[in-house]
């Protein structure tokens, strides 16, 4: 495995992450030799985009790759790992939460390349700014994976499974739950026919603040100031949605806890 | 009140919003004649920054202004309104949640200029990109306020109190609660000594997505995919904080509700 340089990649999966990662691999000068997906539609879409063959039959997966990237749901990765044999090949998965060792029956050379990013097919993304967290079964595979990942991102981190998992939970808060806050905000605006545009500068500034301030230092608003009059009024205004009201109450309480802990 | 053009502003308050707004007013070529704050320290800081006089005595507030901006907590605005008489002057407050009419005892010419943004003294902000929501007691005051606000932002909206209040609740979700998600993420990372840098590109991309996609279309992650294996694992990993665990559970449930409603 020493001095191996990845030049041919087989992409197993055609979801949002696979969609962007396979294009980054191609742009970095490597060849994506084949795309596999369970569904004809996404296999075909990505295969055509990359100008390579595709298959929906796991028995039809090419043996020509140096590297096989399993970019599927956690369940599907486990399922695949029990079915496939890629002895002699390097195989990685891209999951934030899944044990590296689920791949140990597939090959002796396995690892993980987890990009800390959110991917939607409709939205371009610059891989050069994406931290990639790498784990490998041994040092020589790790070196190969660092060389491979370094072709399309300068932000490489070595992270074992327990730390990668914790990072993945943190990412759910920083991305999925944040996005859900945007969703709730948009629903509140809709109830008054107000345009979402009103919040775009606020959303960007709130994120941009993280380049200069800690989340604790950046916090503002009624919960931080413990402005009970405003908080009560807001809870009244949210009576149209018991669900949003409860989330408001809980997050306000959690911000108060944060303030009180830091002040003591 | 017709054809009045604001040239002299008195800033009542020296908090984060007053700090940035008064500088924007000055940069737009108007004069800030005086700053009032309850505390000597913040009055002095902002007065010196603007090169104007300051006071901590509400009886010492200058009569020279054309426009008086009350940029205080909601409670302090109400308190001030009961104490002060600015007959003949234009007076506005900058609160998202407070009735315009709390000012009606202060002058006949009153209104609201609410900037939809989060302000921290340590962080520069471009007023040209901040939506300003304006309300006024009558058309002529509204015209004066639109002219005034138009000097430092092109994003002007006319919004009555009930709609401004709803917008303010939405802003708490889009900003304060989002920031709290960043805080929780940072605490989770700290528990493994992982650097916050790992999440910065994700945080920016999650916000940037809002320029192209709706919050519903932008959502990704285990809750959206209803990936129960991952969700269960995440709840286990959060056992170190029952508070964060409960927030994870509740927001995951809320994302599921969103998906199910939209799919029906």
Image (spheres, coloured by chain):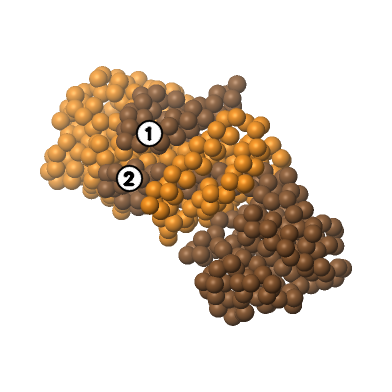
Chain colours: A orange, B brown
Residue bearing the label numbered 1: B242
The image position of residue A213, as x and y in percent, is 43, 58
B213 in relation to B230, above or below: below
**B195 left or right of B39?**
left
**A164 left or right of A47?**
left
The residue lying at 43 percent from left, 48 percent from top is: A260
The residue lying at 40 percent from left, 43 percent from top is: B184
Chain letter of the residue beneath label 1 in the structure image: B
The residue lying toward the viewer, choosing from A250 and B21, is: A250
Tag 1, which secondary structure? helix
The residue lying at 64 percent from left, 58 percent from top is: B76
- Marks 2 & 1 on one chain: yes
The residue lying toward the viewer, choosing from A220 and B154, is: A220
**Dot 1, crowdedness within 10 Å: few (<14), some or many (≥20)?**
few
**A228 left or right of B142?**
left
Tally of numbered discs: 2
Question: To which quarter of the image does residue B81 belong?
Answer: bottom right
Question: To which quarter of the image does residue A110 belong?
Answer: top left
The residue lying toward the viewer, choosing from A219 and B197, is: A219
The image position of residue A135, as x and y in percent, is 22, 40
Q: Is there any visible trace of residue B209 in the rendered image?
A: no
Chain letter of the residue beneath label 2 in the structure image: B
Q: Quadrant of the N terminus of chain B?
A: bottom right
Residue bearing the label numbered 2: B189
The image position of residue A10, as x and y in percent, is 30, 33
Q: Which residue lies furthest to the right in this view?
A: B2
Q: Quadrant of the C terminus of chain B?
A: top right
């Amino acid at each position: 495995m020493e001095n191996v340089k990845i030049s041919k990649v087989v992409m197993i999966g055609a979801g949002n992450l696979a969609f962007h990662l396979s294009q980054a691999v191609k742009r970095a000068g490597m060849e994506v030799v084949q795309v596999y997906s369970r569904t004809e539609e996404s296999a075909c879409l990505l295969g055509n985009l990359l100008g390579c063959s595709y298959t929906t039959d796991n028995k039809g997966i090419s043996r020509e790759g140096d590297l096989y990237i399993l970019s599927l749901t956690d369940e599907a990765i486990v399922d695949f790992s029990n079915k496939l044999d890629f002895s002699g090949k390097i195989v990685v998965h891209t999951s934030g939460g899944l044990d590296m060792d689920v791949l140990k029956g597939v090959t002796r050379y396995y690892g993980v390349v987890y990009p800390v990013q959110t991917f939607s097919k409709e939205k371009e993304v610059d891989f050069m700014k994406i931290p990639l967290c790498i784990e490998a079964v041994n040092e020589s595979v790790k070196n190969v994976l660092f060389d491979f990942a370094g072709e399309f991102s300068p932000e490489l981190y070595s992270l074992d499974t327990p730390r990668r998992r914790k990072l993945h939970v943190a990412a759910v808060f920083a991305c999925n739950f944040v996005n859900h806050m945007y969703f709730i905000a948009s629903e509140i605006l809709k109830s008054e026919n107000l345009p979402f545009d009103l919040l775009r500068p606020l959303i960007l500034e709130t994120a941009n603040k993280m380049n200069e301030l800690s989340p604790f230092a950046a916090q503002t608003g009624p919960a931080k100031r413990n402005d009970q009059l405003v908080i009560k009024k807001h809870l009244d205004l949210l009576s149209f949605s018991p669900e949003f009201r409860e989330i408001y109450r809980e997050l306000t309480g959690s911000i108060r806890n944060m303030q009180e802990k830091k002040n003591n």
